[in-house]
Image (cartoon, rainbow, N blue to C red):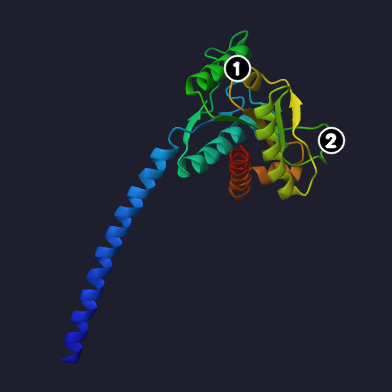
Amino acid sequence: MFAVWKSKYVIAVLAALIVAEAALSVFLVAQHSAQKTTLIDFTVVIDAGHGGIDGGVVGANGVKESSLNLAYSKTLGGIFERAGFNVVYTRTGEGGLYGLPTNGFKLRDMKERKRIIDEAQPDLMISVHMNKFSASYRSGPQVFFQEGKERGKLLADNLQRVFNDFTGKEREAIAGDYYVCRETNCPAVIVECGFLSNPDECAALQTAPYREQICNLIFNGAMLYLYAG
Ligand SMILES: [Zn+2]
């Protein structure tokens, strides 16, 4: 008798739990879509540097910067998307953006990136690259911004701060002249994720855990920038 009552009780509790769980998932879905709606106006452009016949820097084992840039851009974009941000990619395939690989392809490639960025009217733009140095000892991420652009500098400073916490280095974001930063209106940075000229870092950069770690740091730096205003 007790056993029957007990089993009925257990069934009732289980049923209640199932209903509660269903209600909770409906609530979470609603919450998730509410979050998406509130953040949907915030757009990030992620620009995977190089592509096609322009492979960029080549690592010791023959790995192309353009392929790594693409992998990092997709991982980084996924992090922003899961957080509810609107993400626009300049490229999602291995090809370049220049059309035919004829004379002047590099400028056509750059102009197409600018066109995509202008059309997206993003709140910020992150161009993803890999670095190279003449000596193999140099390592770690380095952020660049367009000389004279204050918002870009602020974004770059915050990203570099997060990277420095990670590496223990005391680097500063570096000003320079970069087409995608100069010719666009949003806060824009070039993130050099690491040095392909350093064999150890080149190997690490090709692993998924390190890629995810670096991309999480970029996301954290962007959040720090948004918080800093
Ligand atoms: Zn590059």
Residue 76 x/y as whole percent: 55, 40
Give the quadrant of the N terminus.
bottom left
Residue 38 x/y as whole percent: 42, 39
| Left or right relative to 180: residue 74 | left
Q: Residue at (77%, 49%) from the top-left corner?
A: 168
Q: In which quarter of the image is residue 211?
A: top right
Which residue is the extreme one toward the front? 229
Residue 203 x/y as whole percent: 69, 44
Mark before the other along the chain sequence, 2 or 1 = 1
**Is 41 located above or below residue 113 in the figure?**
below
Q: Give the residue type at disc 1.
A: Met
Alpha-carbon neighbours of circle 1 within 10 Å: few (<14), some, or many (≥20)?
some
Q: Tag on residue 134?
A: none
Q: Nearer the viewer, residue 102 or 221?
A: 221
The residues tagged by marks 2 and 1 sit, at their Cα atoms, a distance apart of 29 Å
**Is 55 located above or below residue 17 in the figure?**
above
For the residue labelled by badge 1, is the local secondary structure a helix, a strand or a loop? Answer: helix
Residue 88 x/y as whole percent: 48, 29
Q: Residue at (71%, 49%) from the top-left corner?
A: 166
Q: In which quarter of the image is residue 65?
A: top right
Q: Residue at (33%, 48%) from the top-left corner?
A: 30
Q: Tag on residue 110?
A: 1
| Left or right relative to 84: residue 29 | left
Q: Is residue 62 visible?
A: no
| Residue corresponding to mark 2 | 135
Q: Is residue 110 visible?
A: yes
| Left or right relative to 4: residue 67 | right
